[in-house]
């Protein structure tokens, strides 16, 4: 039998005997196999292939995707940080990683998404909470993933309802 090696950073997945496949470590159950080949590291890549923590330990919302020893810096979606153990981006509360506060973007008018979760009328956390505009009741702000602010506006004749977090008929909005 001929011994073959997967490209550095990838592991052999023997879960399906009908095809030989190399995959990222998070997708492979090695069982008792615990030996890895010597790493072929390059600048920015601890191994030739795989997903790795950003070289600047303070940068939590980006990671490096190494392909054949070439590092590619990738952003996590807004509000998420890179989780080494899962090799993916996740909510900070779901990782063991301790990061300094993520920077919060602000819109031209100065609005930035507030800290903490926002509960909807049904008692569930809103993934993309909305907030009333201070001067225009037809407008509101959307916080994508709770951290990325965007402008929103209601259709003509509708106003933003702070109790339901939606556009509504003016008659249904308290104080209108």
Image: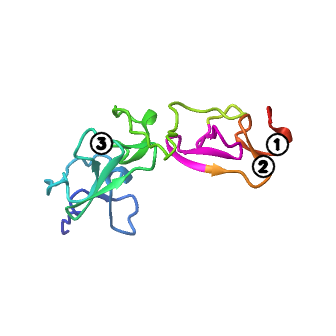
Q: Which residue is mark 3?
A: 59
Side (left or right) of 4 relative to 175: left
- Could you say which is closer to the camera, residue 7 or residue 135? 135
The secondary element bearing badge 3 is classed as loop
Q: Position of residue 138 (x, y in %)?
A: 71, 47
Disc nearer the start of the sequence (3/2): 3
Disc nearer the start of the sequence (1/3): 3
140 in the magenta segment: yes
59 in the magenta segment: no
| Region rendered in magenta | 126-151
Which is more foreground, mark 1 or mark 3? 1
Residue at 74% over, 55% down: 155
Q: Is residue 49 above or below residue 131?
A: below
Q: Which residue is mark 2?
A: 158
Question: Looking at this rendering, what residue extends furthest in the right direction?
Answer: 171
Q: Position of residue 109 (x, y in %)?
A: 52, 43
- Could you say which is closer to the camera, residue 23 or residue 120? 120
Q: Alpha carbon of mark 3 to alpha carbon of mark 2: how far?
A: 42 Å
Circle 2/circle 1 CB separation < 8 Å = yes
The disc at residue 170 is 1
Q: Alpha carbon of mark 2 to alpha carbon of mark 1: how far?
A: 6 Å
Q: Quadrant of the C terminus?
A: top right
Side (left or right) of 19 relative to 107: left
Crowd band around label 3 with a 10 angstrom C-alpha radius: few (<14), some (14–19), many (20+): some
Crowd band around label 2 with a 10 angstrom C-alpha radius: few (<14), some (14–19), many (20+): some
Q: Alpha carbon of mark 1 to alpha carbon of mark 3: how far?
A: 45 Å
């Amino acid at each position: 039998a001929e011994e073959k090696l997967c490209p550095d950073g990838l592991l052999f997945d023997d879960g399906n005997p009908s095809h030989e496949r190399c995959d990222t470590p998070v997708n492979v159950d090695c069982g008792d196999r615990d030996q890895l080949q010597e790493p072929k590291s390059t600048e920015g890549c601890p191994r030739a292939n795989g997903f790795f923590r950003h070289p600047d330990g303070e940068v939590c919302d980006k990671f490096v995707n190494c392909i054949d020893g070439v590092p590619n810096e990738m952003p996590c979606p807004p509000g998420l940080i890179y989780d080494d153990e899962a090799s993916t981006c996740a909510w900070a509360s779901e990782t063991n990683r301790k990061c300094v506060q993520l920077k919060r973007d602000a819109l031209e008018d100065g609005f930035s998404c507030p800290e903490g979760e926002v509960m909807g009328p049904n008692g569930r956390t809103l993934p993309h909470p909305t907030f009333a505009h201070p001067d225009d009741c037809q407008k509101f702000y959307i916080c994508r993933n709770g951290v990325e602010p965007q402008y929103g506006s209601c259709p003509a004749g509708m106003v933003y309802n702070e109790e339901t977090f939606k556009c509504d008929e003016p008659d249904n909005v308290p104080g209108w």
